[in-house]
Amino acid sequence: MEHKSATEVFSEWALIGKDEGMERGHAPSVKAMLELALPKVQNNFSVIDLGCGNGWVTRMLSELGAAHSEGVDGAIEMISKARLTDSNHKYSHGLLPDWKPDMKFDLVHSMEFLYYLEDPVEMIAKIHDEWLNDGGILVAGVDHYKEHEESLTWPEHVGVHMTTLDISQWRNAMNSAGFIDVEIHQVAANDDFPGTLVMLGQASHPQAHTI
């Protein structure tokens, strides 16, 4: 089966309204992720939602206290929908991992994005080095991982590339990128779902402390 790019698939989904179902489906996991992450960031924090889709988390983060909240996604139709819905936030169309933000953030949030990359480990390192302020927090959730057996059929079913890592590999990616106080959680689990795998860590840039 020939794979489409994830950005192409998600643009198609935006056009048929499937993004609204994604929002409903991901909401419990995102709520749990933010409950883990927000106590670790300062007041009036800055945040970017990586793989923002139609922008629903970007808007939610402003309601939860962000002084600056923006989103980026590789699917142009998702960004078009976000911009049509909301003119108060910045939404960038950017193909990752090459796209870079024009500022650094106190918080990077990402739900259901990383495993669509050929090298999510490299992306985690880029987030640490290029996206986060010193002491900033990354919280990233993935539903496709090795221990979630049902998800192993998704690449063929959806027709897109997915990089399959196990929990220890995701943890190692956070550690090797330079994150400290790394936490791994499985949230929003039920009888049929082992939970969204959440990686949480704090950026540590030793050079930032030199005079």
Image: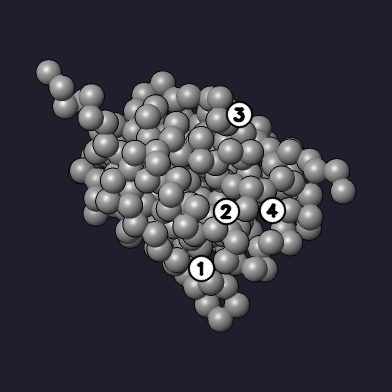
Q: Are marks 1 and 3 in contact (CB under 8 Å)?
A: no
Kindly identify the residue that appears in the image at 73 percent across and 38 percent down.
Answer: 5
Image side of residue 73 versus residue 88, left or right = right
Residue sitting farthest toward the right: 1
* Mark 2 crowd level (few <14, some 14–19, many ≥20, 10 Å Cα): some
Mark 4: secondary structure = helix
Earlier along the polypeptide chain: callout 2 or callout 1? 2
Which amino acid, by three-letter code, is at mark 3? Leu
Look at label 1 and name its amino acid. Gly
Query: Which tag, 1 or 4, sits closer to the chain's start?
Result: 4
Q: Which residue is mark 4?
A: 18
How far apart are the alpha carbons under marks 3 and 4? 21 Å
Query: Outermost residue, bottom direction?
Result: 191
Q: Earlier in the sequence, mark 3 or mark 4?
A: 4
Q: At 24% across and 54% down in the image, what residue appears?
A: 39
Is disc 3 surrounded by few (<14), some (14 to 19) or many (20+) residues within 10 Å?
Answer: some
Q: Quadrant of residue 4?
A: top right
Which residue does the numbered mark 3 point to in the structure image?
A: 95
Q: CA distance from mark 2 to mark 4?
A: 26 Å
* Circle nearer the viewer, 2 or 3: 2
* First in residue order: circle 2 vs circle 4: 4
Sort mark 4 into few (<14), some (14-19) or many (20+) by Cα contacts within 10 Å. few
Task: Judge whether 150 appears above or below 108 on screen.
Answer: below
